Image (spheres, rainbow, N blue to C red):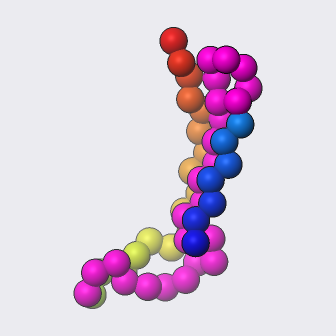
Amino acid sequence: MDLQIKRQMNENQDWYINVYNIFDREYEDELFFPAAGRTVIVGLDFKF
């Protein structure tokens, strides 16, 4: 399960946070290829 939150700060800037694999479950995307654990990404988007 993943989560994404995005908020607009003004007309040219947004901030976001993405959390992948919230529960840090172990599983395989493909045979014998384990998926990444919990991953958190925080960032800003700027529009010019």
The location of residue 32, given as percent across then percent down, is 27, 87
Depth check, front residue: 28 or 37: 28
Instruction: Classify residue 18 as left or right of residue 31.
Output: right
In reply to whether residue 39 is colored magenta, the answer given is no
Residue farthest toward the left in the current orientation of the protein: 31
Is 4 drawn above or below residue 15 in the view shown? Answer: below
x%, y% of residue 26? 49, 85
What's the residue at 58%, 72% (across, down)?
A: 1
Residue 39 rendering spot, x and y as whole percentages:
54, 62
Residue 20 quadrant: bottom right
Query: Which of 48/41 is in front?
Result: 48
The answer to whether 7 is drawn above or below residue 37 in the figure is above
Q: Residue at x 28, y 81 (%)?
A: 30
Magenta span: 8-31
Q: Position of residue 25 (x, y in %)?
A: 55, 83
Determine which quarter of the picture holds residue 33: bottom left
Q: Is residue 44 left or right of residue 37?
A: right
